[in-house]
Image (cartoon, rainbow, N blue to C red):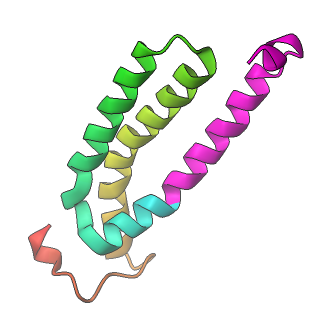
Amino acid sequence: MEFLATYHLLGLVIGIATFLIIGLFHPIVVKAEYYWGTRCWWIFLVVGIGGIIGSLCTGNTLLAALLGVFAFSSLWTIKELFEQRERVRKGWFPSNPKRQAKHE
């Protein structure tokens, strides 16, 4: 951590990690909607709340920032799940033939 602070790299590391975390959530949204539909939204709520609590409980700036980004990306995923459902209905993404659409 001292190395990052000494060479003023903390912001760069947070930026790169933020980019990667957000990029990771796109395929998670697509796969989650494909296999479980929108029923799994509460998992992302719990993970998001856990990330917020973790961010508030740590004194490490880097870890707090990354937990915050992870937490709010999880919460944003809830919205994206429902939007993904609409994208599937429009035919932009494949629907899962094994899952009944009416049970979402």
Is 10 part of what is drawn in magenta? yes
Is 41 part of what is drawn in magenta? no
Name the quarter where the C terminus is drawn.
bottom left
Please provide percent x and percent y for residue 27.
Answer: 50, 63
Asked if 32 appears above or below 6 in the picture, the reply is below
Please provide percent x and percent y for residue 79.
Answer: 33, 47
Q: Residue at x 40, y 82 (%)?
A: 94
Residue at the extreme left of the image, as rendered = 103
What is the number of callouts on the image?
A: 0
Please provide percent x and percent y for residue 19.
Answer: 66, 42
Residues in magenta, as a range: 1-26
Asked if 36 appears above or below 19 in the picture, the reply is below
The reply, left or right, for residue 6 in relation to residue 85 is right
Q: Which of 104 and 5 is in front in this view?
A: 5
The reply, left or right, for residue 23 in relation to residue 92 is right
Name the quarter where the N terminus is drawn.
top right
Of helix, strand and loop, which mostly describes the magenta segment? helix
Q: Residue at x 36, y 38 (%)?
A: 75
